[in-house]
Image: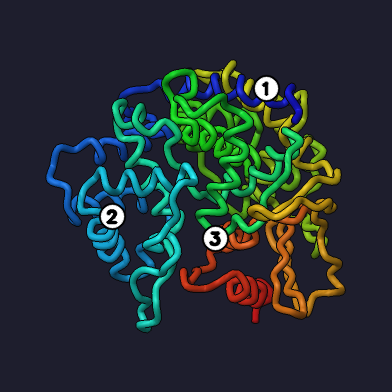
Amino acid sequence: MDTESKAQILAVMRAIAEMELDKEAPSLQQATYNDQKLLISELFKSSKEYNTGTIMLRLVVIDSLYSTNAAYSYFSFEEMADKIYHLLGETEEGARQYFYDIACGTGTDEHRLFQEPFGIQKNLSEGSKQMSLLSKYAYYTLYSNEETRKKYPLGFPIYDSLALEAYPTVCKMLGIAQWTGIDDNIEGYVQALNKVRELLFDGKGLFNGKYQQFDILDAYLWRMGKFNGGNLSLLLSRNDYVEFVQNLGLNAKPDEKEEGKFYEKDADYKKRMIEEVSVKKGFNCVDKQSGKPQFDFNTAVVELYTRENCNPFEGTSDAEYLCLLLAHWRKFNQAKDKQAKYFRFKNDTKPSVAKAASATPAGNFKKSASANGFVVGILPDSKVVVTKGGETCPNAIAALRELAKSMGFTIDPKWNTQQLGSKLVDFINGK
């Protein structure tokens, strides 16, 4: 194990805890990610009677703030609330113990809460699995107050596309084996993160005597994932976000009529950005597949703050802390780009040596399409390969969802990876 990288990761975790997680009351003026967490936590502190109505309200609020899209499956909230209540003992404590046993690896999802679909589609076909939403519900159930956190010091890991994307890089940094089979599998996902958690933390007590171990690990993975994607709006207040975008020179033109406001037609803005970013900042705004000029905001953000001479947080309220995160992410990003060999194993099988995944040559695809920095390819066996910036995305369906959202393509929650990949390729190609 790389002890130097471990020390660096733990130092960043302590900074996150001190600067963000120590906050006790939400700010409606800032509404950062941590403020939203505190708002949700209030629903789990309520003294109201514990019943399906209480559970459903929590699920709806979590789904809304996290955009997990459970509402696309009709009646899914009702069915999830009913299952949580009746199958997990009809008590809050019964639900907590069920979730904590999964987190510790001493229990399984015997009621298939994370594995079975909920609700129905408009055409009456079955709904979709809600692993992401339910993992967040489990997280808040064990996180709700100080007494609960002390009783359940590990907490519960949130199943999240950002954490899935960041997980392989953390393994590379620490010089440890990756687990496979963690996508769309809550027990495999928990086992994988438990291996990382056990290496980072001593014992099973609270981190620094105050924070649940999965909570601080999730906070770290989520922030690295946000830096990977160039989307930091939930980490900053509105004023700091304005400062951040202006520092990068990616803001729309200031409104001549009203000070402090910005306005520019989207087409004019993108045209100007292609010219200015290419000429002034040396960033080539050209789609690699089509060869046509193209500007993507988040891609430009990442390209610019990857550079050592860039200080995008100058003038922000927590500049020193944010610069610490950025400096660490740059090292994280270097590890992410390494194509070194690493061990990969699944569950309890013996490890075997394998090379890091590389993009499949386009000639092997039966159909493919590119857009917004992504390339989606469909192999002859219908397997979907997604690359971003020339690097294979470890979580294909999460990458497909990100691309679909950026293009305004509506997803049916019931679609699996193969269905979504095929339909998105056709959409991009105008079929």
Q: Which mark is residue 88?
A: 2
Q: What residue type is labelled 2?
A: Leu
Rendered view: 303 above or below 355: above
- Residue 180, horizontal then vertical, whole percent: 67, 55
- Residue 430, horizontal then vertical, whole percent: 65, 77
Rendered view: 124 above or below 211: below
Image-based side of 72 in relation to 349, left or right: left
Residue 93: quadrant of the picture: top left
Residue at image point 52% right, 54% down? 187
Which tag, 2 or 3, sits closer to the chain's start? 2
Are circles 2 and 1 on residues that touch, CB within 8 Å?
no
Of badges 2 and 3, the one in the foreground is 2
* Location of mark 1 (residue): 8
Image-based side of 288 in relation to 42, left or right: right
Image-based side of 347 in relation to 38, left or right: right
Numbered label tally: 3
Residue at image point 56% right, 40% down? 194
- Residue 269, horizontal then vertical, whole percent: 62, 47
Inter-mark Cα distance, 1 to 3: 30 Å
**Is residue 255 in view?**
no
